[in-house]
Image: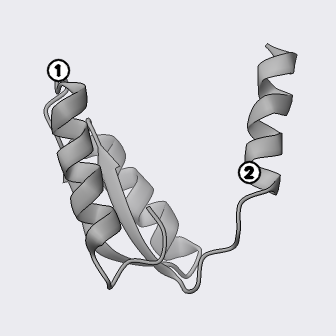
Amino acid sequence: NVHQLFDVAQVVVHQPLPKGNRVAIVTNSAALGTLTAQACQSWGLEVVHGPTAVESEASHEEFRVALDAAFADDAVDSV
């Protein structure tokens, strides 16, 4: 709903900008990961970690492990 949309906007507005253009992609859909990577590249971003696709039925623990790996990669500026 509109209220939730404004909540998300507030989160985005108050986030610091990434240090660079290197991106990691973590998803539960290989197809959407590929589309996201293509979109990133079209905007001049460099996909350096991924896209990493966990299974569509992945547990929160599997997502956490994949995200932790992306955030821990020194070559990544944003996830």
Foreground pick, 62 / 33 = 62
Quarter of the image containing the N terminus?
Answer: top right
Foreground pick, 62 / 40 = 62
Q: Position of residue 12 (x, y in %)?
A: 74, 51
The residue at 17%/20% (across/down) is: 57
Question: Dot 1 surroundings within 10 Å: few (below 14), some, or many (20 or more)?
Answer: few
Circle nearer the N terminus (2, 1):
2
Instruction: Kindly report the distance in space between the C-alpha atoms of the residues bearing marks 2 and 1.
Output: 28 Å
Q: Position of residue 66 (x, y in %)?
A: 21, 50
Q: Tell me, for residue 12, which label it has, or none.
A: 2
The residue at 52%/83% (across/down) is: 21
Relative to 45, say whether 72 is above or below: above
In this picture, residue 46 sits left or right of residue 44: left
User: Residue at label 1?
Assistant: 57
Q: Secondary structure at mark 2?
A: helix
Relative to 46, say whether 71 is above or below: above
In the picture as drawn, the residue positioned furthest to the top comes out as 1
Relative to 65, say whether 20 is above or below: below
Quarter of the image containing the C terminus?
Answer: bottom left
The residue at 34%/65% (across/down) is: 71
Amino acid at the residue labelled 2 = Val
Dots 2, 1 in contact, CB < 8 A: no
Q: Quadrant of residue 5?
A: top right
Relative to 50, say whether 29 is above or below: above
Amino acid at the residue labelled 1 = Glu
Question: Dot 2 surroundings within 10 Å: few (below 14), some, or many (20 or more)?
Answer: few
Q: Position of residue 35 (x, y in %)?
A: 39, 52
Foreground pick, 15 / 52 = 15
Q: Disc 2 or disc 1, which is closer to the eye?
A: 2
In this picture, residue 12 sits left or right of residue 52: right
Q: Tell me, for residue 23, which label it has, or none.
A: none
